[in-house]
Amino acid sequence: MNITRKVFSLASLLLITLLFISPVKAAVWQNENEWDSDWEARYREWVNKEWKEDFFMNPDKPLYYKLSHDCADAVYLMRLIFSYEHRLPFVINNAHGKGTISNKMKTWDKLPPKKRVRRFMDYVSDMTSTQTLAHDTYPIALADISPGDVYVSPGIHSYQIVNITETGIAEVMASTTPKAPRYLSRYESFPFYVPENTKKMTDGYRRFKQPKNIHKRMQDQPGFSDEQYRVADEVGHNYVKFTDIISSKLGVRKEKPAEKSLRLLMALCMYANDRGVYVYDALYHIKEIRAKGRKCMTRSEYDNFSTPTRDKRLRQFFDAVREHIKSTYSQDKHSAPQRWAAAIFSEKPPHPRDMKELDKFCKVELSLQSGYFMSLRELRIKSDAGVLISDPNAPLDYRWGITTEPPYKPKCPTY
């Protein structure tokens, strides 16, 4: 008996010694739960209540404080952080190699637990983009849109859906470029995009794949629907008509004219400022290639940075808002959104008070961190006149129609 006890004691001592000597491979966090319909419901509630504009700028949350992010990073981090805080698996596709990226990775096993999580968040941000979101999410039915779902326009932008209003508006939050610690922006409006990739279905309103389904085709995901692409085609990709259909499916009451004007103006503001990001990206790219001794963009670069389709849609959106105001202005002409919208389209100079309020509501930044701004009214006038230049090689003033004389003549090939 004593010999047995001694052998057992020696074996235990050896095991403990080996544990201290041998490196322990630790996952980023251990899974204690599995994704199912109940956890998805809790996730939607968490996004609605906890996912706020200051999430990454709150010193009371040191693990996430001043974490750098752009629009796609914020989308992934929303799902990742909920998974971590509730010990659920986080699994996405590895777009840069084989297999997946998950919280089971042991790359950072030598770090303390919270530092592992922080490093994992940085790693996921570095490995993902709006392009990879198309592979980690799938399209859903319009009536099924909920907090926690996302809108993705690959290579362009992405949004987190955080609330559905009683009028059926999908409120969104978003980050932007360049990657940096910042407050998230919140908009009581749909994203200004209409799904258009009907064949591949890589854009639009989407939901994260659960880990157990990560390798399944999007058509085999629970709740998959191609409805939004069919609806978008039926309305000719008209943003106003498309979002009216969504709000009718999600809302419990109809929008009032001023409410609709406000959300359309918010979307118009978002879209116009998105153009500022595109102009910035083009100017920055030109600077880069000229530093390498090249003056002009290649065909593929030109296609990536030019904005003819966006500029056409901007004109179409101005026209759609103009029609809305024509048909509803008399119903509520004293409300601020109706007055602002009227100020944009008035042929006569609008009341100074209305322009002051409109500019406070939204001004268009011509290039990121440039300090140069334009009013929505001025942008509408230039869009109507057709003086916005889509050529990414053009200087800033020509891109926005600020300079029109002498007329812009490309010095580089156009495609």
Image (tube, helix red, strand yellow):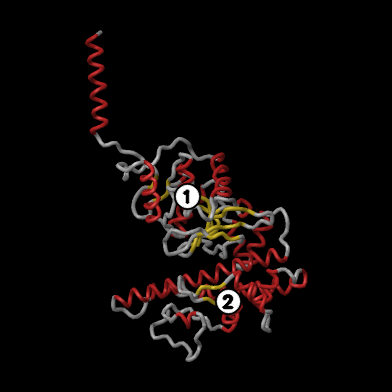
Residue 16, quarter of the rendered image: top left
Residues packed near mark 1 inside 10 Å, few (<14), some (14 to 19) or many (20 plus): few
- Up/down of 20 relative to 260, above or below: above
Q: Which residue is mark 1?
A: 217
In this picture, residue 350 sits left or right of residue 365: right
Of residues 389 and 301, the one drawn nearer to the viewer in this rendering: 389
Q: Residue at x 24, y 12 (%)?
A: 4
Split into 4 quadrants, where in the image is the C terminus?
Answer: bottom left
- Mark found first going from the N terminus, 2 or 1: 1
Q: Secondary structure at mark 2?
A: strand
Quote the CA–CA distance across marks 2 and 1.
45 Å
Closer to us: mark 2 or mark 1? 2
Q: Which residue is mark 2?
A: 375
Q: Is residue 340 left or right of residue 395?
A: right
Of the numbered discs in the image, which one, if any, rests on residue 287? none
Instruction: Determine whether the residue tagged by mark 1 lies in a helix, strand or loop.
Output: loop
Q: Residue at x 42, y 71 (%)?
A: 281
Residue 376 in the image: state x and y as whole percent. 59, 75
On the image, the x and y values in percent for residue 313 come to 57, 73
Residue 411 x/y as whole percent: 39, 86
| Quarter in which the N terminus is drawn | top left
Quarter residue 9 falls in: top left
Disc 2 vs disc 1: Cβ atoms closer than 8 Å?
no
Inspect the image, locate mark 1, and give the three-letter code of the amino acid beneath it. Answer: Arg
Res. 201 in view: no
Q: Residue furthest top?
A: 1
Q: Judge from the rendering whether residue 2 lies leftward or rightward of residue 121; answer left or right.
A: left
Percent across and percent down for residue 268 are 59, 69
